[in-house]
Amino acid sequence: MCGRFTLHSSLKQIEETFKVEHSDVTVLPSYNVAPTQYVLTVVQRDGRNVLEAMRWGLIPFWAKDPKVGNRMINARADRVSESSSFKRPLKSQRCLVVADGFYEWRNTGGKKIPQFIHLKSKQPFGFAGLYDTWTAPDGEPLTSCTIITTDANPLVRPIHDRMPVIIPRRQHKLWLDPENHDLSKLVALLAPYDADAMDAYAVSPAVNRPANNSPECIAPLA
């Protein structure tokens, strides 16, 4: 699964990576992004990539209780095209959740040690995401998203059996295009990222608490 990640890249880096035109979005660095928080996403609107903030934890448009989103922070790649909650967004409501690293916990002798996983390039990247908009009883819309997970690659497998899907830059356009309804091609993108392009190391247990949010969260464990 993916339950925590980081985003401390500059707005300029993000705009260049995702081919976003100049944006007035404020990006505050976070070293411990947690479910139910608002996350930065890339979506395609009128043929342009734009940055939008969405709540992490997808609330389907038909949900009666928004708390259902607390259980939908992730969607499994092998089931996403069949799920009543995710099949509709998969067809035309796809996004990239912007990140530059994520955490998983390695079980070592009965003790779970957090590991920070990132690209060797240290550049920002996009998790495969789906979004939906739920309308509250007072008429206020709430847009939320989920991160798709897949089988772990050889780097992540000793830490956890699953990992978030990272969409390679060359495939951003295909994933974001709302006119692309070819589910077979979309599901084919939900593969483990190249392990040779990634790195991982142990970090402090301080990351276990979402309230801890500083560069120390990604400092290598002594």
Image: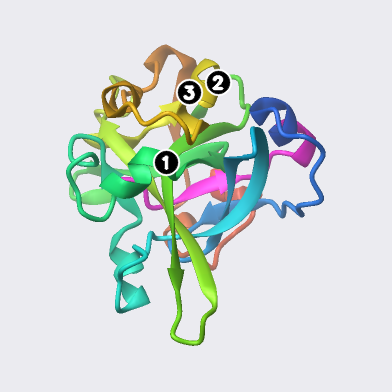
Element class at badge 2: helix
Residue 61 on image: x %, y %: 37, 65
Element class at badge 3: helix
Residue that label 1 marks? 92
| Mark 2 residue crowding within 10 angstroms, few (<14) / some (14–19) / many (20+) | few
Against 44, residue 155 (above or below) is: above
- In terms of sequence position, does the residue under pointer 3 or pointer 2 come before the other? 2
Q: Amino acid at mark 2?
A: Arg
Residue that appears at 72% across and 55% down: 28
Q: What is the distance, in whole Å, between disc 3 and disc 2 at their CAs?
A: 10 Å
Res 15 quadrant in image: top right
Residue 172 on image: x %, y %: 53, 25
Magenta-colored stretch includes residue 8: yes
Q: Which label is found at residue 174?
A: 3
- In terms of sequence position, does the residue under pointer 2 or pointer 1 come before the other? 1
- In terms of sequence position, does the residue under pointer 3 or pointer 1 come before the other? 1
- Tell me if residue 113 can be seen: no
Q: Please, which residue is most extreme toward the top here?
A: 196
Q: Nearer the viewer, residue 196 or 158?
A: 196
**Contact check, label 3 and label 1, Cβ < 8 Å:** no
Q: Amino acid at mark 3?
A: Leu
Residue that label 2 marks? 169
> Quadrant of the image for the N terminus?
top left
Against 43, residue 55 (above or below) is: below
Q: Which residues are magenta?
A: 1-13
Residue that appears at 55% across and 63% down: 212
Element class at badge 1: helix
- Tell me if residue 174 can be seen: yes
**Contact check, label 2 and label 1, Cβ < 8 Å:** no
